[in-house]
Amino acid sequence: MQPLTPPNAVGIEVVAAQPTAADRAAIDHLSRTAGRVLAPVTYVVKVRLDPMPPVTSMGWALYVDDFRIPKYWEYPEGIYFTMVDPQFFQDHRGGALRFSSNGTDFTDTGLVLSEPELVPQDTADLPEQADVLRAR
Amino acid sequence: MTVLKNPGLPGKRSFRTVVYASSGLNYAAVPLLNQYQVFDTPDPDFVTGRLDISVFANLGASVPWPFANTDVPVNGQVSIPRGGGPFPLALFAHGNHSPFENSTPGYLYLCELLASHGVIAATIDVNFLNGNNFGENDARAIVHLEHVKQFRTWNNTHNHPLHRKVDLDRVLLVGHSRGGEGVGHASLFNLLNAVQPDAFSPVVPLDGSVGLGPYHFTLSAVAAIAPTDRQYEPLTGPTVVPDRYFLMHGSQDGDVSSFEGYNTYSRTHGVDLANPMVSDGKLKVLLWVIGADHNQFNSVWAPEFSPGPVISRPDQEQVAKVELGALAQLLLLGRDGYLKVLKDHATAGLWMPTGSRLVSQYQDPRRLFVQHNQEGLAPPVVSAPVLGTVTSSGVQASRQRFDLVNAGAPVPTITLRLEWTALGARIALDVSPATVPADQFKVLSLRVGQSTEAQNPVGQDQDFTVEVSCGSRTAAIRVSSLHRLLYPDVVFGTGKIVMQTVRLPLKRLARRGVEVRDLRSIALVFDRRPAGAVYVGDVQLSD
């Protein structure tokens, strides 16, 4: 296999944001299936990369410990994924962020999953995701 | 018998190519996306709606797309044959690439070829999913299926130029790279009325009730060019493609260098251990193109870095045109003669670029496995319901989930490795003739490939003899008389072991006096090279 270089992750930040309509559907779904009422909050987990890797078809799956993040997306400073269930951060508190291209060999980024920032009482005060993901 | 024509050459039909796109697009206002301005002014007859794919995908936040994931466009370029139709439909989807470059036109060379033979062929815009994203290939599948739906809509729309011109019983989906993974998921989603994309998402109806679907198209096949595998994984596990499956990949692929589509291929139409006689009725085909890279299958992508020699872009496109042309001739246009090309790439030898080196596999829906090796890792056996025993002399035989092509874990299938160190070594499958109705089949077939292990001389073809016996008569056939067993093209590490399907016509055995109704033994005799290591799979009777 080609000796691919994994992305170089240099920082992680978890930002509470307004849920999109799709996020609200996910919140409703998880509230029903988990039997817990979830607040209308989307946690945007931003992983800063330096440098930004080239766009290829081969990809690097992102793991928190052994849990594979199903999907992530690009933003100007790196990649991000969203999570609507705060329990995720409890279950994976301090979990190591790792990349793998094949599910067998892992590269530890040296970063761990951080706690979400405090959510304001009135979630309407949360920023829009587009604002959270804008270039600084 | 009709002489086959080169399916990679243009046909006689004239055609026109038009742009279809969603209304209200204004890429012109976004200088960074100026390559997409072609979609700002679609043909007035081919204006489309929008899709809400927000449950499946976000859009990369680094690109100023002039729309959101709740209203992505349905854009493409379609080549339409002139004439009455109805015409079969082929839809090509690109893979991941810089989102600032429009990848869509890269398959026009294939669309125009197919259109000239009487196929409506389009290349679709999935660029808004491109970037440093991961796991989005379910969304690529949904977009691909929604484009089929668009053509169904046009086919059903009075006064539309495509009214009653699309043969929706003959549809081919082709995807390259991540789009190649996507067509496998599309094949699966096509059967569903709803899907839950992942554990965090709600169930999404695909029945048209909220915009997506219904699908349930008659897919003649899905074809994957240099695909990824399992970047998206359904909650039900790795996708098993339910339709006919075609896979093509280049040995000098400097992007998807792992040939992970091989795992998709292995999962698809595999043997059911509980019902080994039962076939799902679908064929699968694999073509390994030595010297082909990743990007040259798309005519607008610059070649990526490949460490070894890469064949020229015209040659690589010619391979794609011949193979996909043959697939379309067979499955879309009903020209059965082209099945020969899929069964054995050598049939297309004269149409391929000079000096082409190819390896191919073919699994026919009609087959009776004599030894498929999927029972487990114990020493090799004859596979039920065929009864018999395996004996060997001078051969080390072991079964493992070998990762033959660096496709990554988990390896779905078990392969038999055979090693010998002296001439005359052999392994024989002695079978009960009553359990082997060979007279009902046309060929004895197996897959075999050599490795770069030290036993195999560098750069030399491997060879051995297949001995088939009915007891009273034995025929000995050199494998090299059926096919070359090429030394691997080593690009990374130890190279990839891509097995070649070897098909021995039973008529040839009969001509040598073997009574195929009374077949008693199939032996691999290593009498051509003093030493070697080969990997063997799927010894079977087949058509």
Image (spheres, grey):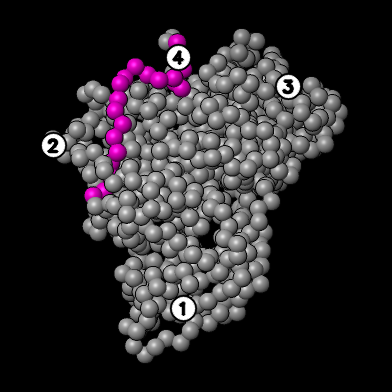
Q: Tell me if residue B20 is in the magenta stretch.
A: yes
Q: Nearer the viewer, mark 2 or mark 4?
A: 2
Q: Nearer the viewer, mark 4 or mark 1?
A: 1
Q: Looking at the picture, do discs 3 and 2 lie on one chain?
A: yes
- Label ID, residue B465: 3
Q: Secondary structure at mark 1?
A: strand
Tag 3 or tag 4, which sits nearer the N-term?
4
Q: Report the amino acid beneath label 2.
A: His
Name the spot of residue B485 as percent of width and height, x first: 69, 26
Q: CA distance from mark 2 to mark 4?
A: 38 Å
Query: Which span is picked out in magenta?
Result: B3-23
Q: CA distance from mark 2 to mark 1?
A: 51 Å
Residue A110 found in image quarter: bottom right
Cβ atoms under marks 3 and 2 closer than 8 Å: no
Q: Which residue is mark 4?
A: B4
Q: Report the amino acid beneath label 4.
A: Leu
Q: Report the amino acid beneath label 3.
A: Thr
Name the spot of residue B235 as percent of width and height, x first: 45, 60
Q: Report the amino acid beneath label 1.
A: Val
Q: Which residue is mark 1?
A: A15
Estimate how packed mark 4 is, as few (under 14), some (14 to 19) or many (20 or more) residues with alpha carbons within 10 Å.
some
Image position of B157 (left or right of B462): left
